[in-house]
Image: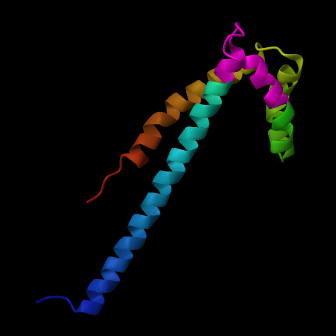
Amino acid sequence: MRKPIAQRIKELEERKRALQSRLGKQERAQETRRKIVLGSFVLERLAQDDDTTGQCDLRQWLAAQLPAFLVSDADRALFADLIEQCRMGQGHGVADGNAQQSTEHLQQTNGNQADVIGDNEP
């Protein structure tokens, strides 16, 4: 015997909510991954020796823009070394460590986010 239409509609609405929730998780995971990759890219460019990649302009831009973007004291403390290096025009030191840490974090989270992003349910 077939289910009543009202019950089928209710089940479909529940399924829709579950799928929307999953889509939201996927979108958040992708956004997080984009931020990690972009951060790793910027730190890598800042750490390079040659000035052919435009990191001098990047340092100036970061020194001017990053302090205003960071709203919490914890964030300011986290990026204090990078901001100081950008102001001084240096590309080595802690930024190199940050680039390495970001790259390692990206490699560690790759599998976790792939699980969320690649989660396919019929």
Identified at 76% across, 12% down, the residue is: 92
Residue 111 or residue 44, whichever sits in front:
44
Is 54 included in the stretch rendered in magenta? yes
Q: Is residue 80 above or below residue 92?
A: below
Is 74 included in the stretch rendered in magenta? no
* 28 with respect to 17 (left or right): right
Residue farthest to the left? 1
Number of numbered discs on residues: 0
Which quarter of the image is occupied by the C terminus?
bottom left
Part of the protein shown in magenta: 43-63
Q: Is residue 98 above or below residue 72?
A: above
Identified at 74% across, 20% down, the residue is: 95
Residue 29 image point, x, y percent: 51, 47
* 16 with respect to 69 (left or right): left
Residue 97 or residue 53, whichever sits in front:
53
Residue 53 image point, x, y percent: 66, 15
Q: Is residue 51 above or below residue 25?
A: above
Which quarter of the image is occupied by the N terminus?
bottom left
* Colour convention of the picture: rainbow
Residue 11 image point, x, y percent: 31, 80
Identified at 34% across, 84% down, the residue is: 10
- Residue 81, can we see it? yes
- Residue 96, can we see it? no
* 67 with respect to 5 (left or right): right
Q: Main secondary structure of the magenta part?
A: helix
Q: Is residue 15 above or below residue 41?
A: below
Identified at 31% across, 85% down, the residue is: 9
Query: Which picture quadrant has residue 85?
Result: top right
Residue 52 image point, x, y percent: 68, 10
